[in-house]
Image (cartoon, rainbow, N blue to C red):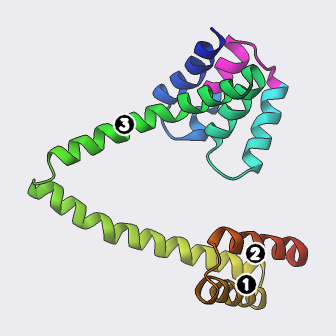
Amino acid sequence: MIYWQLFLAFFIPNVVGYGGGPAIIPLIEAEVVGRYGWMNAQEFAETLALGNALPSPIATKMAGYVGYDVAGIGGALIAVLATVVPSLLLMLGALGLLYRHRDSPRVKRMSQWVRPVIAVMMAWLTWSFLSAGLEGAGPLHMLLIAAVAAIALLRFRTHPAFVILAALVYGGLFLG
């Protein structure tokens, strides 16, 4: 029964909520604190603060933590699945629709416009990261990290995760 309650506590907010993690947090709080009483408001606020401090989507982190707190590893798995299933189902439906109409001239035109839009968005993101890095760390540190990362990736074929980890360690030691 607890697994079903966990599923509903995270599935319903993710179905009716619109706007991503921050928009559904109050809905999740209403379920976790108000309806089921698994946490009090203070514990939920602390969990939210911890979740905001970590990378990745907030809703999945909250689901994993609350699910684990309530019902162990199985609870964490159920709560995370309940969080991602609504989006997964919508994506599968949209992909099925696009696949069914893949020969349509409208769908082909739409697909042709997606790549340049993504390229512009990625360029903007890169520029904003570069600007923030230059402002925060300074050009010397930026160039050093970029040069070492380029050599590690291109010359030594180091896995990107290790390059990112090394940059984080460098930033923690010399820029923190």
Please state, as top left, top right, bottom left or bottom right, where the N terminus lies in the image.
top right
Q: What residue type is labelled 2?
A: Ala
Marks 1,2: beta carbons within 8 A: yes
User: Disc 1 and disc 3: Cα gap in Å?
Assistant: 40 Å
Q: Residue 121 appears in which quarter of the rendering?
A: bottom left
Q: Residue 119 appears in which quarter of the rendering?
A: bottom left
Residue 101 position, x and y percent, is 14, 47
Marks 1,3: beta carbons within 8 A: no
User: Disc 3 and disc 2: Cα gap in Å?
Assistant: 37 Å
- Identify the residue at image location x=71%, y=29%: 73
Point out the stretch of residues depicted in magenta.
27-41
Q: Mark 1 points at which residue?
A: 145
Magenta span main SS: helix
Residue 17 position, x and y percent, is 50, 30
Disc 1 crowd, CA 10 A, few/some/many (<14, 14-19, 20+): some
Q: Which amino acid does label 3 sit on?
A: Leu
- Identify the residue at image location x=75%, y=13%: 37
- Identify the residue at image location x=13%, y=56%: 106
Instruction: From the viewer's perspective, tell me whether residue 162 is left or right of residue 9.
Output: right
Q: Which amino acid does label 1 sit on?
A: Ile
